[in-house]
Amino acid sequence: MLKHTRDIVEKNGKTVRENNMEIKHNIPIGTLVEVKYDRWHGNGACSKIHARLFVASHDRDCDGTPLYSLTEAKPPYEGTGPNDKKDFIDLTIIDRILIGVQTGFNEKALTIIEVNEEVIRGYGALSWTCIHGEETGKCKECEGLKRLKEKGEIP
């Protein structure tokens, strides 16, 4: 019979799950983080995400690996329930949908962003890159193509 990964006993005599449950979450709830990931939707549809979001909760997967849920709404939260609860764990599924919670991020995928006046005002915010790997608006090749299109020299 096959064992689930979480039930495998490691050299220290503990299961994978027991060892993972001892690993602490290192990024506090409410911290602004940057995350990049891609999502395959199937049939050729996909998306690349590059976002700054807030840590909403500390979670774990089935083998105890620490994971994070992220949202664009900074805690504490205004719940829609009768008690208007503030803790993420107390929010209903509807509340979680309303604040755009995304789950299942491991710590390696997250970069902590120091919140300062420049970040708050949007300076140095995320920028898109062109097909040449340059920041949008700064690529000489793209700007040259744009000028040629404007002149009608290329379609």
Image (cartoon, rainbow, N blue to C red):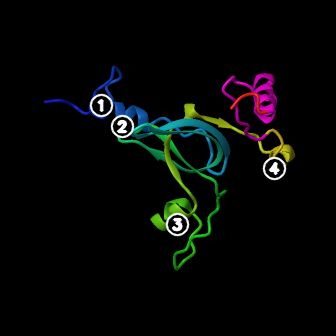
Q: Nearer the viewer, mark 3 or mark 1?
A: 3
Q: Which residue is mark 4?
A: 120
**View extreme (bottom): residue:** 82
Quick check: 110 left or right of 152? left
Q: Which residue is mark 1?
A: 5
Query: Crowding at label 1, few (<14), some or many (≥20) Cα neighbours within 10 Å?
Result: few
Viewer-closest of 14 and 82 = 82
Amino acid at the residue labelled 4: Ile
Earlier residue among tags 3 and 2: 2
Label 1: which secondary element: helix
- Residue 15 in view of the camera: yes
Q: Which residue is mark 2?
A: 63
Which residue is found at the position 81% from the left and 49% from the top?
A: 120
Q: Position of residue 154 (x, y in %)?
A: 72, 28
Query: What segment is highlighted magenta in the picture?
Result: 125-151
Query: Crowding at label 3, few (<14), some or many (≥20) Cα neighbours within 10 Å?
Result: some
Earlier residue among tags 2 and 1: 1
**View extreme (right): residue:** 117
Which residue is found at the position 80% from the left and 44% from the top?
A: 119
Amino acid at the residue labelled 2: Asp
Quick check: 106 left or right of 132? left
Which residue is found at the position 61% from the left and 38% from the top?
A: 35
